Amino acid sequence: MKPPPFEYHAPPTLVEALTLLAQHGDEAKALAGGQSLIPVLNFRLARPSVIVDLNRIDELIGIDATGPSLRVAAMTRQRAAERSTDVAERAPMLAAALTHVAHPQIRTRGTIGGSVAHADPAAELPAVMLALDARFRLRRGAEERTVAAGDFFTGLFSTALEVDELLIDIEIPAPAARSGWAFEEVARRHGDFALVAVAARVVLDSAGAVSDARLAYVNAGPGPFRSARAEAVLVGQTPDPDLIRAAAAAAFEDARPAADVHASAAYRRQLTRVLTARALAAAFARAAA
Amino acid sequence: MENLDHRWFGKRIRRNEDPRLLTGRALFVDDVQLPGMAHVAFVRSPVAHARIVEVDTRAARARPGVYAVITAEDLGDYWQPGPLLVSPPPIEGHIFHERTQPPLARDKVRFVGEPVVVVVAESRYLAEDAAEDVFVDYDTQTPVVDLERALEPGAELVHGDLPSNVAARAHQSLGDYEAARAQADVIVARRFRYDRGASAAIENRAVVAQWDERDQELTMWDTTQAPIPIRNGVATRLGLSHSQVRVIAPFVGGGFGPKIMMFYQEELLVPWLAMRLGRPVKWTEDRSENFFATTQEREQIHDAEMALTSDGRILGIRDRFLHDCGAYDTYGLTVPINSQCTLLGPYLVPAYDSEFTCVFTNKTIVTPVRGAGRQHGVFVMERLLDLAARELGLSPVEIRERNYIPPDAFPYDYEILYQDSAPLVYDSGDYAPALAKAVEMIGYDRFIAEEQPAARAEGRHLGIGVVSYVEGTGIGPYEGARVSVEVDGRVTVATGVGTQGQGHFTSFAQIVAEQLDVDPARIRVVTGDTREFAWGTGTFASRGAVVAGNACHAAAVAVREKILKLAAELLHAEREELELAGGRVLVRGQPERSFALGDLAAKANPLRGAVRPGTEPGLEATAYFGPDRSCTASGVHAMVVEVDPETAMIELKRYVVVHDCGHVINPMIVDGQIHGGVAHGIGNAFYEKLVYDDNGQLLTASLMDYLLPTSLDVPTIQTAHFETPSPLNPLGIKGVGEAGAIPVGALFAQAIENALGDEAPEILEIPLSPNRLFELMTARATRTGSAAGAGTAAPARPEIGVPARRAAEPGEAGPA
């Protein structure tokens, strides 16, 4: 379990990191917290010839709550986001979901951007970003673009990021009035990747009907996805147990989970239904509060 | 409980070894760094079953920094299959085909991970790079994975020179089962399965070897549980005298059985390479290798039935089972015989008819892992009792009470042979009070009467379980110890067993302290270094405390005699007037007439002219202890579990262990052993599983997929100790190392069934998982047309969306 040889760079600035990535193209791999890349290297499942370590780039760290949206820089440690009062206030679902990401020791090293850019279908953060309608600022050389979460995640371990492009920060819009959220997960052990998890955000109108609903799933499909059917069931309706049950059944229909040694597809679909119901009940309770 | 008659024995004393362990200053094998040391990596088979057509090592040899690349051919005469560790007991009519592992596969590979080529280089990185350069052409054969298919006619053969994949078969019986069956009011029969787990010690295996050309001596650091047999074997294989080889098993981070296996291929190759290359060689197993190359356990399939009277008394049991021994059967019949014998448990079974068949498969070798076959037997017995109880309308507590061997029946002879070839005779025990205590501690009656119905009314599914078991521990042949009083007043104890975290440095010190009344903190215990103590066997079968502990006791008694004899002479007193107290020997009531033990030790080293015939220097003695047969520890485990029928997730609410290992040397250490064992058992029952696919590929070969329970998954465990002393050794102790792990699977099955009540599927297999539980519940719901099972539309809780599965964790916001 030793990695094959590679060239190692630890540039102190973003510009230098982008230059290195541009220089080496798909031979290079960016290293964030290393929670996924290092095991993959040690198993010799990936053999990048160049590693560009982002850990010395200060400009990629920080949480900015001064604007209308919350901005979380890509190399912000998960533990820092989890403990941030700004995150707790402006994106409480993110703080809640982070407690499910492994254990404190691992979150102290793991980064928000690393998890998002890796796009593991079992990881919590991509689904949270979908539910929060986050936007990702990407840079390649001097070019910058912003991509909505819905366009960023393109499938199993795949994103809109180009090989020489870096995620700079994540913009999370402020929650609407009368909105509620919930994050529900089932994992084998405390801290494991989700067997299935759901990130739910609902908004109620003045009459108490659902004006907006976003239900995003972890490990219920080949990548993070929203259940269009379940959201459609909800919008325009007044929440009650029957509505919740109907939405859960719709999410069950939308789920296309894979089977692995830990869970069959049937079990994951069952969890999708159960967790959808539980998350919606909690989210509606919060929205009404 | 504290024993008031003793000064040190039986006391809750902090462990002598912990300051070194906790501050990272204890020596482990991988800490050994020697000048010029080379590092080893293995080319291991990526396939489960294949003929080796060609091995091309040229590219690897040419890589800079590579010292050697060795194939089976290169080993010459050194290539030969390893020894059979344990010969089968003389069971009448048994079959046993000995097939043991070679140091490197030559013509054929038989499991994924079997070593084919060994690469030595200046660093582990380079060695792994070079291992990738080796080309092996495998002509794959159909892998033998499934136990039953392995026995079908025409099945591919793991060992082509045998007529079938049957490795062994043995039948043992007592009484007349057919007659018992004919008289029975009730017969319960089921098929039970247990699957594989890893021992998953925190420290993987490691070997360092150094050949000293000037002294003509080989030193080997090894994570083995059996340093003396390793020394003897390595010396013989290398053509050296035993005294030319020193094996050191320093601190070892967990053994759990697989580290008793010998010879691992690596253990034979590393010293050979060190001699051949003339430089020290190190191999440290990585976690990935550990999953393939370190031995595993626990796959069996039982077809068992129990015959009972209408009042729930066992008339007899019949069992036929298959045991997976993996690719080689190096450990003989120990594991299946443990299953066969331990099944009988603490119960009166008048008729027993049991036959097992060991099956070769293309999977990692099976040798004992903590419990060593006992889990399976206990699972079958306890499940049969639960099924019978349900059929007869008895509670699980009642049916056990009715069948216990009564306390006046000991020694109780079961008339069959145990793994140590001695008859299965229980030395002592008293089971009903232990059950009563566990029932009281878990609050069984209140749970059934109040707690369970109250939770159910809230839509929560709580269940309770209680199971009992016995464990044959402390088997022979023998261990030894040397106790020496040093001139500074400290005492040194040396013994041959290895130590892997059991607390030997403290327990053995307490045993010696009891005789000499020296503070155990001033007693230095040395284990696992063949230069310090050259005779013995090793740490296995819950025997360290029983066998080595009694040897320490015997040596300490002998040293005490020497102290009294010499002190009587020098103090001009009668021996009967003397006592040992606080590190001194004194005339009782006259503290001025005394010697510090260190001063006495100095006087025991005679000057010129003081030596008379028969004089032996020093306050030192060596003694040995070998029990006639094993001693029978026992216990009762009980737990309360909550099951969420919608998600099939569980939460352990309470866990109780009442345990009897005879006299307890240190209750804190015994508690720790039990806690660790229960954690291991919880892992086996609900988290850990080695999943092999049809190609014999292990799908759970990392700690990401092989799920060890963490501190967050193991509940607080309440323990109580009963002391039924063993008459088989002077200290009256029994083993405890494996106990905690043994009955946990049976307990999970009973408690989860109880939680699910009328909707419960029968649980006839271990390990479980949420997914497997969901499948079992779904299958039952489908079969019965029940609308309440998982997977159906109707929720099992009254109001949807009330997350009752667990209390909110800190930082996890609950529903507003």
Image (cartoon, coloured by chain):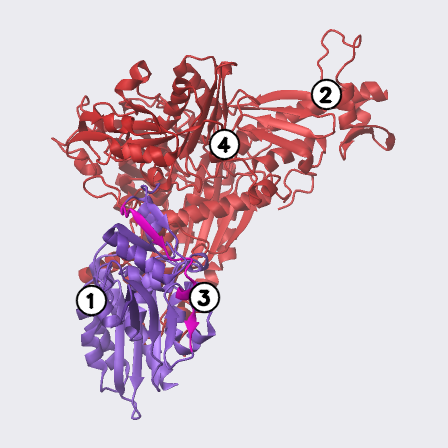
Asked if the stretch drawn in magenta spans residue B354, the answer is no
Question: In the picture, which quadrant includes the C terminus of chain A?
Answer: bottom left
Q: Which mark is residue A80?
A: 3
Circle 1/circle 2 CB separation < 8 Å:
no
Foreground tag (4 vs 2): 4
Estimate the spatial distance between the alpha carbons at disc 1 and disc 4, rounded to whole Å. 53 Å
Pointer 2 indicates a residue of which chain? B
Q: Which residue is mark 4?
A: B32
In the rendered structure, the answer to whether residue B318 lies left or right of residue B508 reads: left
Label 1 sits on what residue type? Ala
Q: Is residue A154 visible?
A: yes
Dot 4 lies on which element? loop
Q: Is residue A200 above or below residue B417?
A: below
User: Quick one: which chain is red?
Assistant: B
CA–CA distance between discs 1 and 2? Answer: 79 Å
Q: Which residues are magenta?
A: A45-65
Q: Which residue is depicted at the point 83% across and 19% down?
A: B570
* Residue B562, numbered label: 2
Q: Amino acid at mark 2?
A: Lys
Up the image or down, B45 lies above or below B431; here it is above
Please say if the residues under marks 3 and 1 sit with CB atoms less than 8 Å apart: no
| Residue B215, horizontal then vertical, whole percent | 52, 14
Mark 1, Cα crowd under 10 Å, few <14 / some 14-19 / many 20+, is many
Q: Looking at the picture, do discs 1 and 4 lie on one chain? A: no
Q: Count residues near mark 2 (Cα–Cα under 10 Å), then give few for <14, some for 14-19, many for 20+.
A: some
Name which residue type carries label 3.
Ala
